[in-house]
Image (tube, rainbow, N blue to C red):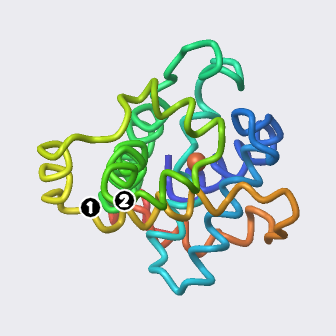
Amino acid sequence: MNSQTVVDRLIDLFNKHGSSQYGGEAVTQAEHGLQAATHARKLGLAPCQVAAALLHDIGHLLHHFPDDAPSKGIDDQHEELGAAWLEKYFKPEVVEAVRMHVSAKRYLCSREPDYFESLSQPSVLSLKLQGGPMNESECGQFEKHRFFREAVALRKLDELAKDPLFKTPEVEDFKPELEAALLETKGNRP
Ligand code: FE
């Protein structure tokens, strides 16, 4: 796929499949990604971080588990599924932040007690399936990762992006950030 095709395919995924509920939250999958990306923009984060925020749960749009998988005891591993799809087209800082956004929740629950208090009920439920808070040695390993900061920043946006009243632009509005986040291979250049 060339850059236009990748970006259009993602926009299509949001528009056609984004209306499913975001795992027990009061927002849809599309609203959740759009809210995370809008918060990233408002904070003045880099285009790759805005793109990662928009795409962090794309794995949920690529699999066929039910919306309420965690309440049935299923960890859908959407972060791995999303990263595996994205890594063919997007820069590592996007891909790795997406891959690590669940681990970042486990990290923050261990390092920042207030963060655990901020989690929604569905997020507390999925935390258990994802392995619970990290222990000391897991936290130490996580902090050494090249994209540790990006992953933690993304995770904080994730928690902000569950507000049914928060207004965002349409997904098409994020084309510039998506294009800036693509790998600079010949086929991806606009
Ligand atoms: Fe999320």
Position above or below: 153 against 41: above
Distance Cα–Cα, label 1 vs label 2:
5 Å
Viewed as shown, does residue 80 lie left or right of 5? left
- Residue 36: x %, y % from top left: 62, 63
Which residue is more in the foreground, 139 or 174?
A: 139
- Residue 70: x %, y % from top left: 60, 22
Task: Look at label 2 and name its amino acid.
Answer: Ala
- Residue 140: x %, y % from top left: 13, 53
Residue 129 location, quadrant: top left
Position above or below: 30 against 115: above
Q: Does mark 1 have its CB less than 8 Å from ligand 1?
A: no
Task: Look at label 1 and name its amino acid.
Answer: Phe
- Residue 112: x %, y % from top left: 38, 60
Secondary structure type for disc 2: helix
Viewed as shown, does residue 13 lie left or right of 43? right
For the residues labelled 1 and 2, say whether their Cβ atoms are less than 8 Å apart.
yes
Image point (46%, 69%), residue name: 49
Which residue of the protein is positioned furthest toward the top in this rendering?
A: 72
Are there few (<14), some (14-19), or many (20+) residues within 10 Å of tag 1? some
Q: Which disc, if any, is residue 151?
A: 2
Residue 125 makes an appearance in the image: yes
Image point (55%, 14%), residue name: 73
Label 1 belongs to which residue? 148
